[in-house]
Image (cartoon, rainbow, N blue to C red):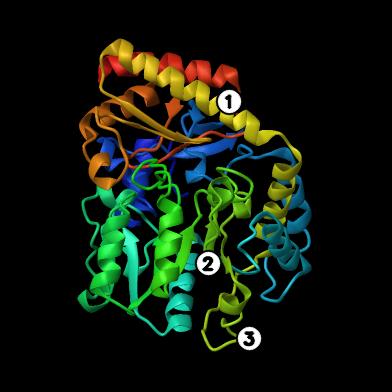
Amino acid sequence: MKYSIRTSLDLYRASREVIPGGVNSPVRSFQSVGKSPIYISHAKGCQVFDVEGKAYIDYLGSWGPMILGHANNEVVQVLMEQVKLGTSYGLPTGAECELAEAVRELFPSVEMLRLVNSGTEATMTALRLARGATGRDRIIKFAGCYHGHVDSLLVEAGSGAATFGVPNSPGVPERLANLTEVARFNDLRSVERIFEEFPNEVAALIVEPVAGNMGVAPPAPGFLEGLKALCAENGALLIFDEVMTGFRVSRGGAQEKYGVKPDLTTLGKILGGGLPVGAVGGRRDLMEQLAPSGPIYQAGTLSGNPMATAAGLKTLQMLRVSGIYETLENLGAELETGLNERAAKAGVPCRINRVGSMLTAFFTDQEVVDFDTAKTSDTEAFGRFFGAMLNGGVLIPPSQFEAWFISGAHADMHIRKTLEAAERAFREV
């Protein structure tokens, strides 16, 4: 740069002159926790380091994909080998086929796969495919579930949109928003009412099988099975958004963990081993309707990028042969128990929701099962907790309505240090 910038605050001030809000994704601004963002210089294992040299135990994990930890040596090695061969071709490679085959082996519902560049592209493609295949226009989603910044799905969205108070973004045409119906997570009757009100109009229902964008909210027993039955009964497609849960809650995602097969699945995050990637997969008869084998158009110059496919293949290979999921479960249980104990000791109302290596601490005395109950959380208390944890060298997501992620690079000593910081942080809430 043309002048010396040494601190995160310096960088934030400079960035705000050339980048809207100073960040390239809203939640990174730290606005919802009343702070300015930290700027990262590098990361390794389960730690990130800011530009001032401070280390943080990281539970952000780039919002989920770093299941092996940052700069994993084996992933770095395949990337170094690939970069010498070229970073983008715009033509097919064998690695694309190999990655699709690997996903098909792990996800029984995925008979064919189309690679794209992000989770948002994946859900956008899934909706277009569902509408084209069914000849219907209406979509059902759930309040608090976030599926990327697709126009049709920015209605009562979770994630960063929730804490910014703009779940219905300007720029989304009202006529398009009116084709999206919003149900209540874990409430089958709310879904039934929509199907009753709009018979033969619903193309698809899209759901995070484990909600992670209102904070973690597991599916109630029978909820996913009920969604599958309702979709089948009403001729609508069931789409599982597993951008976050895919390869995270189990090797085969939430659909393997809960034993429910959707018609279409969207993937991302871990699939690229930390590089930008997304995918939509599902039944062969549906997927073959995508161009060039069918009439429904979708394209992308960087789709199947050789860097992303190399990192993704190595990551999936390592997930298949290691005992990482047992490690993640044990560390998650240790962190959950420890947070509960320390919140109780401090007399702070707190609910910990966890599925495997995903968890959220809600500052409420209510059980969190959907967006309404998630919103009972005291976001100001969370902001104070976040700041205290950051000061203690622990980075958690800068939003109440996001999931924390544990990686295979975390160890017992990192959990212990995290809980020491949490004990102090709960006292400051």
Task: Classify 10 Å Cα crowding around label 3: few (below 14), some (14-19), many (20 and above).
Answer: few
Instruction: Return the residue at label 3.
Output: 293
Give percent across and percent down for residue 93.
75, 70
Q: 309 left or right of 41?
A: right
* N-terminal label among 2 and 1: 2
Instruction: Return the residue at label 1.
Output: 330
Q: Assess whether mark 3 and mark 2 are in contact (beta carbons under 8 angstroms).
A: no
Mark pair 2, 1: CA separation: 31 Å
Mark pair 1, 3: CA separation: 45 Å
What amino acid is at disc 3?
Ser
Image quadrant containing the C terminus? top left
Give percent across and percent down for residue 204.
40, 70
On the question of residue 178 being in view, the answer is no
Mark pair 2, 3: CA separation: 17 Å
What residue is shown at x 48% (from left), y 23% (from top)?
Answer: 335
What amino acid is at disc 2?
Leu
What residue is shown at x 38% (from left), y 20% (from top)?
Answer: 340
Give percent across and percent down for residue 37.
36, 39
Q: Nearer the viewer, residue 87 or 148?
A: 148
Farthest residue toward the top?
A: 345
